[in-house]
Image: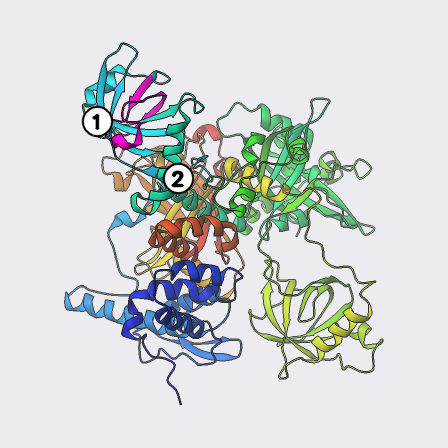
Amino acid sequence: MIDTHKPMTPDLSPYREIIHSLAPLVNHATFNKAFKRRTQNISNDLSFLIKMEIKRLAKPCIRSIDLRTKVKDECRLFNYQGIPHYLHVNGIFEFEKLVKRYGEYTFGVYEGVIHFSEQEKRRLETVKTHSVLVQDTELQIPDDKFITPCQELLNFPVRREERLNYVVNIEVFFADNTSAHASTLDISVQGLKIRFKDPDTLEKISVSDPIHVVFRGLDRGTGLARDSIEYKILGLSGRGAKTCVHLLRADCSVNEHFSQFVLDLIKLQKRRYKVNLDNVEMALSSKVYEQSFSNTIPGLPVFVEKTEDGQLSAAYASTNACSKRILDYWLDENHHQMLGYLLNPARLNMLAMDSAAYPQTVVYCFHHIADEKIYFYSASSEELLEQPKLAETFLAYGARRVSWRVFHLTYSDVTPSNAYVPSSVPDGINKEIDKLNKRLSPRLQGRLKNLTGMVTVTDITNAKAQEVYQRRNLDKSNIRLLKFFGHARNKPPRTIETYRHKQKELRRQTRYILRTPVEVKTNQGFIHGFTEDFSVSGLRLELDSEFQQRLNSKVQISFPKLQEITDNFDLKNVQYRVKHVNTDRQVLHLQAVSEDETGVAEQFFSQLISNNSDKLQALEQEEKIPGMSIALRNLHGKSSPQTCIYVEKQQNGFVPAMATINQMRASWLQFLHHNANLVSFNLSWLYQDDMQSTAFIRQSIKMMSLDPKPISTEIYVSFNPSQKRKENQVYAKWQYQLSSHRAKRSFIKSANESGQFFAFSVTFNKALRPDLERLEQELLYLSQHAIHKATYFEERMWDIAATIFLTDITQEVLYRYRLKASDNVV
């Protein structure tokens, strides 16, 4: 038997980075182009060996991984597509990370997990030799591991042309005929970045001043060594002796000889002097995290426009798999969207007119079903204050119903022009870049021009909080008066157009719409449901009840109605494998399983498609307005008030790698920045139980590896900036640590007395597989000039294990426990 688990030959070890970055892309359309680009300076013989090694790593594997003799931790049985593995918790995470990257279980995954376990073993041995006490495989590191950099989403400079890192001596002439010596740092046809030899020269200049530059250091053969090029000052960056001055050409049509010289210089010397890639790196850093943010955010962004009569109206919603459940809650019995009841004009005007730095409100909702019709009831916290006699009855009655929900609404201003987010690479590099940089169509701009704001709707319903409202006094005589908060069925709200985030289509076959009853046989019994759509090898089902099995488990599907139209196929107990389960566990994505090359299901559905090609409707992926989903996604990224923390699995556990938040003024930002600078968050308060075996963040992320359903809870924070020791200024408790409502109320009172109290709804989401196609062109451009930097950003995408979203619910918690807002020091 050939041993496939062998190290690469010594000749290939220098190319390990190329091999492991390209192996997951073997089945990708751009593999050959990427391979040629990365191996263009390697001999043909070596290129052939590298390609063979890449393809070997990408081959499907059926080997079982057993780490029981390789790692210190307890290993558990972990089945993946029928193949048993014995892995410890860290091994399972590494396995899932690699499978997500390769798309299936391959030799690259097998060898990667083995290599990971060996590295972990060596690391632990190193620690032991230095006599460091290790209580767990997640090693302790200094407290500054929780000082996390923060940035805004989609905030990066866009350049219209390439800039070359190019240093040459120049002389700068000012309006008063004086001059100063300087040197260039980078150059483009229209721009220049310089640094003066004498920092005192900076006192002579100001923004928008005209200056003239003579390039003294150029070779006389260029004919430009004495030419004076007019610029104007755009701005300054840096400090002291490292201050840089940014210049813009006054008129590029003057001295075309100089313009052509710069173009030729960039074209011929970009490999020698290197193109300035600062803005590309900033863009990729932002877009990597924006991708995780948009795909996992639990809040639903709804965009508000001003109508012709001056009223505010909810017009569009941008949804993902997590926020779709909010839309589903507002469906009536006919599946018509009624979200407009929640975001009625009165509430939108109240939020838009709110002069607070952080306009927000809380809306309490429930359903009432009568005669098979759904009646919606909702009341905001302000509306309840206006009706104190009905407020108690509304909260007590509503909280006793299964349909009870609490929604947090936050208002943000929107600028329609922010919907246009080009790539960070200038036009002219290739056709794909030019396509990405294309302006929004006039039709799309016309639909966006009236947008004035965005409301982020977040479901903050909490079972423990619901108990508190249930304890309120229920005056049954007032129940009939609750129709005051009901929404009239004869006055339906405006339909809000919904656009789902466009993801790269991973399916290899066309899907067709078909609704037919099915019976699903599981380990627990039978579940009935209907098909939503199908392809030759796949199904999407909607079930009547929750599905309890894990991903990649097998189920048997029977098609009673389809069986009636065929005698050639047995459509009972057809085997499928579960590939995806939605958050409500009632929508399944299945893949056909067969021992033969094509199974019964694939043969039947292939014939069904062939015989009914004129009747079956293909599932359309096109939007009503091309480009609308990405435009709304861009607006959301640039305007969202949601704080998000991105967690990576590192040697020392699950550590925050980045936080994103857009510019806003909120009182709770003060304690996020405590003991950190203004471009960082101190997140140690989220990890205050990190040394315990029940550490909430660690346990939640591990739980999501087994069940990807989002996990939500609450955290309570006491902030006392008067404490001398900064580590004592912030004190936090998770909801589970305050076991009773009396304990929670006591914590709030104590926090108010000593300083400030804050409360957050916290939602954990498992990171989804990155969509490399969205960043492909920028990664390709970056790899041409700095392959190690492109590899770094690719790894960042795959390293994100989970996202943590924070929603400020301080006012709702105070109202819940009957504590006045004035008790909270602001």
**Marking on residue 281:** none
Look at 80% across and 35% down and name the residue there: 491
Which of 133/639 is in front?
A: 639
**Element type where label 1 sits in the image:** helix
In the rendered image, the residue lying farthest to the top is 176
Q: Splitting the image into 4 quarters, where does residue 23 fall? A: bottom left
Q: Position of residue 656 (x, y in %)?
A: 36, 50
Q: In which quarter of the image is the N terminus?
A: bottom left
Left or right: residue 433 versus residue 151 is right
Residue 752 visible, this orientation: no
Task: Return the residue at label 2.
Answer: 279
Task: Return the residue at label 1.
Answer: 240
Q: In which quarter of the image is the C terminus?
A: top left
The span picked out in magenta is 211-238
Q: Residues within 10 Å of mark 1 (few under 14, many from 20)?
A: few
Q: Distance between the residues labelled 1 and 2?
A: 23 Å
Left or right: residue 312 versus residue 692 is right
Residue type, label 2: Asn
